[in-house]
Amino acid sequence: MSIRLVSRRGAIGKSWHAAALRDAAERLLGVGRAGSGKADARAGRVQWLDVEAGTARGDVLDADGELHQARLDLPPYSPDDREEFVRIARSRPELPARLAGGIYPEEFERTLAGSELSLLPRDASELSHDCSCLDWPGPCRHVAALTYVLVEAVDEHPVHLLTLRGLTLEDLVAPRETAGSGGADREEEPAPPLPAYDPARTDPELLAAAIGPGPAQIIAAFYGSQDRAGSEDLAADDHPPDDLQ
């Protein structure tokens, strides 16, 4: 099953973030490869797309019917960059919902720039590529076709940019503070265990209210409840079933 682009003519990618990814990729591909890759992508030659941390991969069908394994790489954040990104993102509690809804706010990207961060490739040099074909050093038309499929996927699902950078939507959600904990990082202390149930110390009237007078009288008599008189009073009003006598 191949992937067919929504775009049939003109530039691929409508949103600002898809256009930014496309422009960076086209600087890597060059005019010739960009043209052939766009044609192959629109012809449905890319069979599938998988996006994971640092890598977008897919099989691309060649004109002779051979499949080639193409890959485009955008490096995940370093631990320090990841920490800074998460800090900024958590100050925008609406961001996960907007990303999940297909919107990557351009103003958030400008905020990231103040910390020298970006979800998008800031230059073509940040992208790398590989393919199983013999067109070395590339980038080949298979990588180009995969790139345009990725651009359109990012256009609809900007969460792919998070994935490439090694993040998830869950990472952007600040943990809830526990009441009285004094901070979000402290775990909630477990509640003390409830005392074990002791039938011999159970008030027969409360037990009768829960399970009925007859069964309550039997339990009280069997376990020797401290308030036997209460159970005897109950027994005067209601006798246990015949099969329990």
Image (cartoon, rainbow, N blue to C red):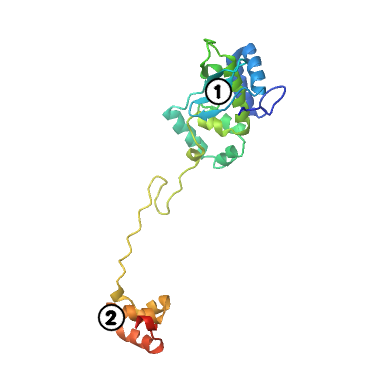
Q: In this view, does 190 lie to the left or right of 30?
A: left
Which numbered tag is attached to residue 59?
1
Please report contact status of discs 1 and 2: CB closer than 8 Å, yes or no: no
Query: Against 136, is 11 above or below?
Result: below
**Viewer-proximal residue among 224 and 195:** 224
Quarter that holds the N terminus:
top right
Image coordinates for residue 31, horizontal then vertical, percent: 64, 12
Which numbered tag is attached to residue 83?
none
User: Can you name the residue that lies furthest to the right here?
Assistant: 9
Q: Which residue is drawn at 39% across and 44% down?
A: 185
Residue 96 appears in the picture as rendered: yes
- Can you tell which of label 1 and label 2 is closer to the viewer? 1
**Viewer-proximal residue among 199 and 131:** 131
Mark 1 element type: strand
Image coordinates for residue 95, horizontal then vertical, percent: 56, 39
Query: Against 8, is 244 above or below?
Result: below
Q: Quarter of the image holding residue 226?
A: bottom left
Image coordinates for residue 157, horizontal then vertical, percent: 60, 34
Q: Which residue is drawn at 56% across and 34% down?
A: 159
Quarter that holds the C terminus:
bottom left
Q: Quarter of the image holding residue 40?
A: top right
Q: Quarter of the image holding residue 23?
A: top right
* Residue tagged 2: 226
Q: Is residue 83 left or right of residue 45?
A: left
Q: Which residue is drawn at 57% across and 15% down?
A: 28
Residue 205 appears in the picture as rendered: no
Give amino acid for label 2: Gln
Query: Against 226, is 55 above or below?
Result: above
Image coordinates for residue 94, horizontal then vertical, percent: 57, 42
